[in-house]
């Protein structure tokens, strides 16, 4: 494509493409952009001509982007950031007056405890923003690259694209949740003691197909594990601990979310844990963005307070 052809590109088409990529639905895209659905359909036709590609294919659940469209969607944040930088080279972010979205994706095992500390800070500093604190899911990495998620919090051992930066903040520490009045809460924690307990496990996207470290420790000691419940929701796991008089290995970040009748016991050094760090994840292309800088500072402060 030569310069003359590039100069003819309507930036509004790229805005529509970005929202279409997020919504995968022409009606919802029209609602978000405050235009008629026919406008979106016409724009999609122009996009197909511009990129010489179908761009989106209709399926039962909505629009599905073609491989070429996926590649273009990945590049759009770079385009819009470059335009912002050109017109606002000294742009500063003022959270107190910001009226857009702030989206933070957090590993489901510590979304609730982080939200308890982070939400009041976000609301106090950004009173006009629409706040979204969501679970880290299988497509969060892609959403970070596309700008749909501003920043994520997860374990550092994730295998992510080089387009997503992994910034370790604090060491990942682990303990065992149990009922405060249970025998386990008073007993010495040994591998043999763990094997005699009912175990509840948190399932996490990107880790669901891996054996938990407690199961590995018991297997290495040739002891069986009595896993009675698995869930991807912390509150559900805590209910299961009550009903099963069970234990649950978890990040120590969970401690602040435990109900009064529960406690968390530290694991002795002789029991190996996954190690690693708790990290912030964000798109490399946005690393200089003032809004992201503010979020990084706020989340780092929150995680270090909880450590």
Image (cartoon, rainbow, N blue to C red):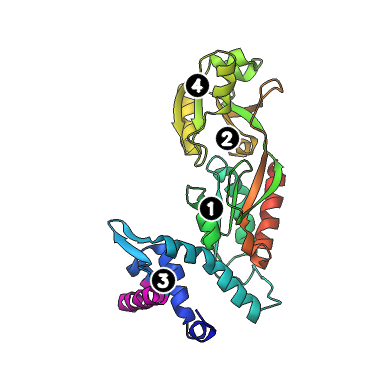
Task: Using a 10 Å C-alpha cutoff, classify the residue at mark 1 as few (fewer than 14 neighbours), some (14 to 19) or many (20 or more).
Answer: many
Name which quarter of the figure residue 265 lies in: top right
Q: Name the dominant secondary structure of the magenta segment.
A: helix
Q: Earlier in the sequence, mark 4 or mark 1?
A: 1
Q: Could you tell me which secondary element the residue under label 4 belongs to?
A: loop
Q: CA distance from mark 3 to mark 2?
A: 39 Å
Q: CA distance from mark 1 to mark 3?
A: 23 Å
- For the residue labelled by badge 3, is the local secondary structure a helix, a strand or a loop? helix
Tell whether 179 sits left or right of 290.
left
Mark 3 Cα-neighbour bin, 10 Å: few <14, some 14–19, many ≥20: few
Question: Would residue 264 be counted in the magenta stretch?
Answer: no
Circle nearer the N terminus (2, 4): 4
Q: Earlier in the sequence, mark 1 or mark 3?
A: 3
Residue 22: tell me if it is visible. Answer: no
Numbered range of the magenta stretch: 30-50
Give the residue at mark 3.
32
In front here: 114 or 82? 82
Residue holding disc 1: 141
Residue pointed to by mark 2? 258
């Amino acid at each position: 494509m030569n310069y003359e052809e590039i100069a003819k590109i309507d930036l509004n088409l790229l805005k529509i493409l970005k929202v279409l990529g997020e919504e995968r639905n022409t009606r919802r895209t029209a609602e978000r952009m405050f235009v008629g659905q026919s406008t979106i359909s016409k724009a999609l036709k122009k996009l197909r001509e511009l990129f010489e590609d179908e761009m989106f294919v209709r399926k039962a659940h909505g629009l599905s982007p073609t491989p070429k469209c996926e590649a273009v969607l990945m590049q759009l944040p770079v385009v819009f950031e470059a335009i912002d930088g050109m017109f606002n080279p000294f742009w500063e972010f003022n959270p107190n007056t910001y009226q857009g979205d702030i989206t933070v994706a957090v590993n489901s095992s510590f979304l609730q405890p982080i939200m308890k500390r982070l939400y009041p800070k976000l609301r106090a500093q950004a009173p006009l923003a629409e706040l979204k604190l969501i679970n880290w899911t299988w497509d969060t990495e892609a959403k970070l690259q596309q700008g749909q998620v501003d920043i994520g919090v997860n374990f550092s051992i994730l295998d992510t694209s080089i387009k997503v930066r992994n910034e370790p903040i604090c060491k990942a520490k682990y303990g065992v949740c149990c009922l405060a009045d249970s025998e386990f809460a008073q007993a010495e924690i040994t591998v043999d003691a763990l094997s005699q307990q009912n175990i509840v496990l948190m399932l996490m996207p990107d880790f669901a197909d891996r054996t938990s470290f407690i199961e590995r420790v018991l297997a290495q000691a040739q002891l069986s594990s009595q896993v009675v419940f698995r869930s991807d929701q912390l509150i559900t796991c805590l209910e299961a601990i009550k009903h099963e008089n069970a234990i649950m290995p978890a990040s120590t970040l969970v401690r602040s979310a435990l109900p009064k009748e529960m406690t968390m016991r530290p694991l002795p050094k002789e029991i190996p844990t996954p190690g690693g760090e708790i990290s912030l994840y964000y798109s490399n292309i946005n690393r200089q963005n003032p809004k992201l800088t503010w979020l990084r500072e706020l989340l780092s402060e929150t995680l270090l307070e909880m450590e």
